[in-house]
Amino acid sequence: MPLIFFFHAMITWALVGMIWHVQRVQYPRFFQVGEDAFGRYHMDHCFRISFMVVPLILLEVATAGWLIWAGQRGTLFLSSLVLIALAWICTFALQVPLHNRLTEGGKSDEMITRLISTNWLRTVAWTMRGVMVGWMCFGGVG
């Protein structure tokens, strides 16, 4: 296995860990923040999580591109790339607008519930991708 593939897999699994943390820890905590502190808490969450997630997703895509350029074109690997696209589509079509509504409108249990329920799409997509990439790392056909 090329070192770049191992690096790619590590990035993917960092994102898997991050999305599960957001899904099971960060987003549910939004319910516990009082309305008066919610705006600042939410903005702080968005700001801080961006510094963690943005470099990782850019590295994931960059290393995926590098792998394709280097000849990694197995069905499993290419199928796993569809899951990156799904996660990004969910991010920009669902999560970003919901975060914007929370930023503009303040705390809303309905918006937080929607944020959590729609985020399961990204959580499942990145988890499935992590399993696929992990399988390829440990001898599975890529």
Image: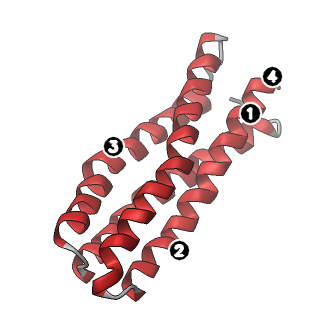
What residue is shown with label 3?
89
Of residues 1 and 142, the one nearer the viewer is: 1
Mark 3 or 2, nearer chain start: 2
Which mark, residue 129?
A: none
For disc 2, the marked residue is: 24
**Inter-mark Cα distance, 1 to 3:** 24 Å
In this rendered view, identify the residue nearer to me: 35 or 32: 35
- Circle 2: element type: helix
> Residue drawn at (47%, 41%), measured in percent from left and top?
83
Q: Position of residue 48 (x, y in %)?
A: 50, 57
Crowding at mark 4 (Cα within 10 Å: few <14, some 14-19, many 20+): few
Labelled disc at residue 7 = 1
Residue 73 in percent (x, y) is at 60, 19
Q: Amino acid at mark 4?
A: Pro
What SS does tag 4 mark? loop
The mark nearer the N terminus, 1 or 3, is: 1
Q: Earlier in the sequence, mark 4 or mark 1?
A: 4
